[in-house]
Amino acid sequence: MTNKKLYISNTSIHTFLQCRKKFKYKYVDKLNLSEKKPSKYISFGNSMHLALADFNSIKDQNLKTLDILHNLLRKNWVRDGYESIQEEKEFGLRGLDMLSNYYSNPKDTGKDNLIIEKMLYKNFNDYTLCGKLDKVYLRNDDTVEILDYKTGNTITAIDNLQLSIYLILANKELGYYPKSVSLYYLSSNKKITETVDTEVFEKSLKNISKICELILKEKDFDCTPNQYCKSNCEYYKICDIAQDSSLAILHSINSFKNNEISTHIF
């Protein structure tokens, strides 16, 4: 596919599975054609993650107060993407409220933090697997847990692909596999945990290996067009297949509407 070593992440794998042509544009050709405005949701999530990373890094327990946690959010606040001062204020107050609920009943207390907000890399022969771990810590029951903070409202199960990458990267950093992986939903202060064992470790390695080999062997990078290409894909303007598909979809919709109107007329 390419002589350059490829960096593969959870996001890039999902892009490949969604549309291989988009993957090529973004991760092989490294084209940046995005005209989208900064997302307030991404800014909010980054602000919360940075605040919690700073808070988790505090060694002196006497300094781990709610006021300090709130001030860490203010210190790390990312202002991009908000439509108005009022909207930014609403998100800020929401963030403070989420941190207050977290502080009053944290689901991630333990004996020691082993990894905090760190980008990790695992080198293989033809590619490098990469990803950021929010927190890996030794729990009070002496087991090690990988934790991913979530700031959205929708609660979903742990994605097997992401779980696999977490385990591989944590093993690279620690020299062993953690016993559990959790998603911590801050908006509802709930944590979803999946316990992992040797069978899961082995499946994780095979799963990631197969997908990465598929990516490396890919030559055609076919486009997988859909009706959302124009609104959701930054490469729409340079992708003839997606544009042709959009016209076909539009023609199909118009034909359906015309037939529907004809039916009503007659």
Image (cartoon, helix red, strand yellow):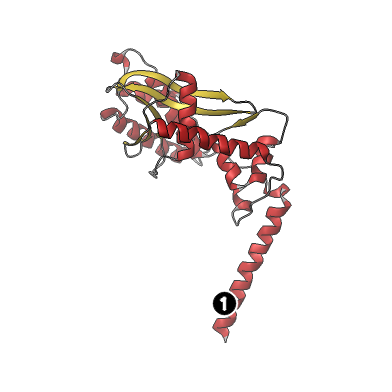
Q: Position of residue 119 (x, y in %)?
A: 52, 24
Is residue 78 toward the left or the right of residue 24 in the image? left
Label 1: state its secondary structure: helix
Q: How many marks?
A: 1
Residue placed furthest toward the bottom? 266
Q: Position of residue 94 (x, y in %)?
A: 37, 37
Image quarter hosting the C terminus: bottom right
Residue 231, compared with residue 39, is above or below; it is below
Residue picked out by circle 1: 260
Quarter of the image where one finds residue 108: top left
Residue placed furthest toward the top? 60
- Crowding near pointer 1: few (<14 within 10 Å), some, many (20+)? few
The answer to whether residue 20 shows anywhere in this view is: yes
Q: Position of residue 137 (x, y in %)?
A: 37, 22
The answer to whether residue 33 shows anywhere in this view is: no
Q: Residue at x 37, y 16 (%)?
A: 58
Residue 3, compared with residue 266, is above or below; it is above
Most foreground residue, 4 or 263: 4
Most foreground residue, 189 or 72: 189
Residue 234, compared with residue 3, is above or below; it is below
Is residue 43 toward the left or the right of residue 195 in the image? right
Q: Amino acid at mark 1?
A: Glu
Q: Position of residue 79 (x, y in %)?
A: 50, 32
Image quarter hosting the N terminus: top right
